[in-house]
Image (cartoon, rainbow, N blue to C red):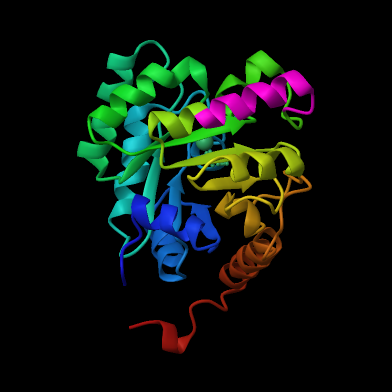
Amino acid sequence: YKRVTVKSLVEMKSNGEKISMLTAYDYTMAKIVDGAGIDVILVGDSASNVMAGHETTLPITLDQMIYHASSVIRAIDRALVVVDLPFGSYQSDPKEALRSAIRIMKESGGHAVKMEGGKEVKDSIKRILHAGIPVMGHLGLTPQSIYKFGTYTVRAKEEQEAKQLKDDALMLEKAGCFAIVLEKIPAKLAQEVAESVSIPVIGIGAGNGVDGQVLVTHDMLGMTHEFNPRFLRRYMNLYEEMTTAFTQYGEDVKSGDFPNDEEQY
Ligand code: KIV
Ligand code: NA
């Protein structure tokens, strides 16, 4: 396989080829996602919810993100691996942001970092980029600021917030980010942003006028079943299938059906 790089993603945008991205937090899942030819694997701080069961993304630590990312990296032959900088690892000042990004690159072997926010994090983004570390931006619904907004509803529906988002996207491009994630904003606004920048815009709940799509793998597999946003397309119903498998196994053990004669030494 030819490895996906930040440069090939920008080329994909100029060639009109859509970019596919999914999350992974462990070796086994990453191996399957990479083998299926998905372009970008995001070690998202959604691991805080999906892996650890926290209500928000805020509690996950830099050490925990590095653990997840290093597990993912060991599985990869082709995909570009982007690692979320977790809440608290980059907000206080650009030096701390750079230290955190360097730890991710050195200790996990990830290929790029992602951070939430626009002009508030501009100086940190520049500092990280100066060190040669590629940065992906993330605008719109930014779960690390959930307590500032109070809800997970659609963002930038009003003109002022939409204008700010457009300005932030242009700033991220100018600062040197290689791509931007847009989360849960009106499709029309997302398309306008994608048309206004030359770097790829990857959407989640941002419509089809952008340059690529990302979903949380556990959600699209239907392993989670309490999370039902409109943008989520479920490709499997693993919650039910796994429940059936576990129930059957439990019954087989109880009844003495498992193991049978061939399943022992
Ligand atoms: O952490 C995550 O999974 C993300 C995606 C939803 C973009 O940031
Ligand atoms: Na995230």
Q: Nearer the viewer, residue 213 or 173?
A: 173
Give the magenta part as a residue range.
Answer: 156-170
Residue 257 vertical position relative to residue 146 in the rendered view, above or below: below
Q: Position of residue 210 (x, y in %)?
A: 63, 50
Where residue 160 sits, quadrant-wise, is top right
Q: Position of residue 174 (x, y in %)?
A: 43, 30
Where residue 129 sits, quadrant-wise, is top left
Q: Nearer the viewer, residue 99 or 8?
A: 8
Q: Is residue 214 left or right of residue 108?
A: right
Q: Residue furthest top?
A: 92
* Residue at the image position 76 percent from the left and 30 percent from the top: 153
Residue 52 vertical position relative to residue 38 in the rendered view, above or below: above
Residue 221 vertical position relative to residue 117 in the rendered view, above or below: below
- Image mark count: 0
Residue 162 highlighted magenta (yes or no):
yes
Q: Position of residue 248 (x, y in %)?
A: 64, 70
Is residue 115 at least partly visible in the picture? no
* Residue at the image position 22 percent from the left and 30 percent from the top: 131
Q: Is the N terminus in the top left, top right, bottom left or bottom right quadrant? A: bottom left
Residue 90 highlighted magenta (yes or no):
no
* Residue at the image position 49 percent from the left and 57 percent from the top: 14
Residue 55 vertical position relative to residue 90 in the rendered view, above or below: below
Q: Is the C terminus in the top left, top right, bottom left or bottom right quadrant? A: bottom left
Give the dominant element type of the magenta stretch: helix, strand or loop: helix
Q: Position of residue 75 (x, y in %)?
A: 32, 60
